[in-house]
Amino acid sequence: MINGGFSFAHHYMQLFIYQLLTSTVLTGIRMKLMSKINIVHIFAPNVLAGAERVVLTGLNALVSEYINLTIIIIKELRSPKHADDFAELLDKRINIIFINSAKALDINLIKELNLKLKSFENKRTVIHTHGYKALLILRLSKNTKNFHVVHTHHGNTSHTMKVKIYEWWAQKVMQNIDAVICVSTEMKKRLSTVIDQKKLIVIENMLSFQNAHSIREERKELKITQPIHLLYVGRLSPEKGILHFLTLFSRMELRENFQVHIVGDGPLKNEIENIVKDKNLLQVKLYG
C-alpha cells in the first residue's frame, strides 16, 4: 500500500459523504463510497522529476482505493515524449486521455478539454488538477462551476516574468475552488495569507511503505564502517524542507557517519551556504 492514496481518497469522499452515506451499509462502506465517485486528474507532465513522480505515485496508489480514476494528460507537442513517458508508468487500470497543446495557453486545448469533460457532467465527479497550466485551462473552460475541484499546489518556480504572472493568476483561481492540497505545512502557511485556511489540506509527498518493517529491522543490524551518502537533487526552495533538514542534521551527535551532497539552485542557495558555513557542517557538500 502506498501511503497517501487513502489520504487523497478520504478528502474526495468528504465532498460527497453526506449524499452517499444513507445508500450504503457499514460493511465495505469505503469501497461503496469510492466506487460512486469519478476522479479526473488533469496534468501537463514535464521531464520525470519531483512533481511528476509525486503525481505518478499518488495515481498508482489511488487505483487501490476502488476509485473510478481517469487522467487527462496535456501533451505538449513541443516535447511529446514527456507525456508519453509519464503515461507509460501509470497503472494499466487508470483510464488515460490525451489532449494536445501547441502553446502555453492554447484555445483549442480549452475546447478539447470541454469535450472530454462533458461525459462526466451530471455525475459525482471530482476534478483534481496539478500545476498552474492544468488549473488555468480548467478555469478558462469554465468547468470549475460544474464539478468539485481540488488542486495540488506543488510549489512555484517564478523563473521568468511570464511564469510569475501565470502563478499569480493560478493563486487567484485557487481562492474559488473546493480544496487546495499543500505538499508541506510550510506551503500551507504561505498560502493561508491569501486563501481561506479551511480550504487548505496538507498531504505530504507519498512514499511506498510496503517494506517498512523489514527496512527497520535491517537498520537495527546495520554496522557503519564507512560514511553513508545522502544525495539531494532539486530546487533549493522552502517547500523542499532543506533548511529543516540542515537544522536537524547540525544537532546530530554522529553526523560524521554521513556525507550529504546537495545538487541544485534556487532562492535559498545563499541561506543554505551560510548555514553550512556558520554551523561548520563539514559533511555537507554543495554543488550548485
Image (cartoon, helix red, strand yellow):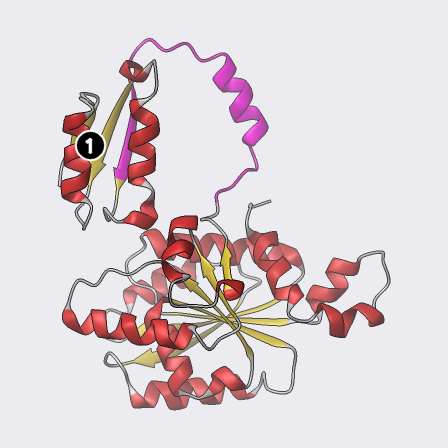
Amino acid under disc 1: Ile
Against 118, residue 191 (above or below) is: above
Element at label 1: helix
73 or 181, which lies in front? Answer: 181
What span is colored magenta in the figure?
207-232
Q: Which residue is drawn at 79% across and 60% down?
A: 29
Q: Mark 1 points at which residue?
A: 275
In the drawing, does residue 279 fall left or right of residue 30?
left
Q: Residue at x 73, y 65 (%)?
A: 33
189 or 93, which lies in front? Answer: 189
Name the quadrant of the N terminus: top right
Q: Is residue 279 magenta?
A: no
Residue 261 picture quarter: top left
Name the quadrant of the C terminus: top left
Percent coordinates x, y for residue 279 in the rendering: 20, 24
Percent coordinates x, y for residue 25 in the rendering: 86, 63
Q: Does the magenta stretch include residue 216?
A: yes
Percent coordinates x, y for residue 143 in the rendering: 48, 85
